[in-house]
Structure formats: structure tokens, C-alpha cells
Image (spheres, rainbow, N blue to C red):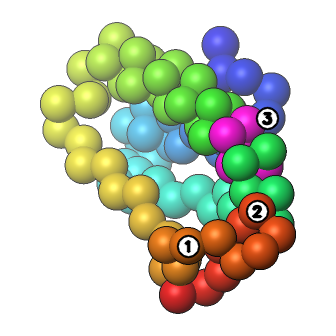
Amino acid sequence: AYPHNQFGKALKDIHILFSSPELDTQIGYMRPIGFDTHSTQNDRLNPLLTQFNQAFGVFIQNMKSLGLWNNMIVMVYSEFGRTNRENGSQGTDHG
């Protein structure tokens, strides 16, 4: 079962699309929120990454059980970079 968070809900929807042959879905996309961490990054980012990891683990297992995983490419990206040093408020800014 997918966790009840933004990642679990999005990946469950993608699961449904991929596992419905009549829809012939070939691309799934999710846009999570909350990663714009200008301050207290450690306190905000760690829970988000943990939630993503848990939901994505369920997704992987479900795709494997359906025989779909070996035919998938997964891409995770961000639309902007981050500075590699703290900005003074325990966060990072756009690079």
C-alpha cells in the first residue's frame, strides 16, 4: 500500500495508469512541492526525502510484481540548482 502523502498519492496514480493496458500510458510525471528550502533545510528536506523514499520503494515493488520494472526508465530532476554553501539561515539559495 502506498503511504498517505503527496508522493504516495502521485505514485499510486502513475501505478494505475501504467497497469491499465487499455490506456497505453508510457510516461508518468509527478511534481512534488516543498523542496524550495531557503531556510532550515535539514529540518524540511530530510522528512521529504524519507517520504519519497518510502513511496518510491512501494512503487518499485509494485512495478516489479506487474513485470513492468525492467522496461522503465526513472528520471528525477530539479528545475533549478542550489548553492553549495549555507545562506545564513540553515538553507541554500538558487544557484
70 or 24: nearer the viewer:
70
Q: Residue at x 67, y 40 (%)?
A: 46
- Rendering coords of residue 91 (x, y %): 72, 66
Reading the image, the residue beneath label 1 is: 85
Residue that carries the numbered disc 2 in the rendered image: 90
Question: What span is colored magenta in the figure?
Answer: 44-48
Q: Nearer the viewer, residue 41 or 60?
A: 41
- Please say if the residues under marks 3 and 2 sit with CB atoms less than 8 Å apart: no
Q: Residue furthest left?
A: 70
Task: First in sequence, mark 1 or 2: give its number.
Answer: 1
How busy is the neighbourhood of tag 3: few (under 14 within 10 Å), some, or many (20 plus)?
few
Question: Where does the image place residue 50, in percent across and percent down from the top left?
Answer: 63, 31
Under tag 2, what secondary structure?
loop
Give the label on residue 15, or none.
none
Mark 3 vs 2, N-terminal side:
3
Mark 2 neighbour class, 10 Å CA radius: few under 14, some 14 to 19, many 20 or more: some
Q: In the rendered structure, which disc, 1 or 3, sits on the residue that comes first in sequence?
A: 3
Q: Give how far across and how far down residue 28 sits, in percent.
A: 46, 54
Identify which amino acid the numbered label 3 is placed on: Asn
Is residue 36 at least partly visible in the picture?
no
- Disc 1/disc 2 C-alpha distance (Å): 9 Å
- The residue that label 3 is drawn on is 5
Describe the element under mark 3 as helix, strand or loop.
loop
The image quadrant where one finds the N terminus is: top right
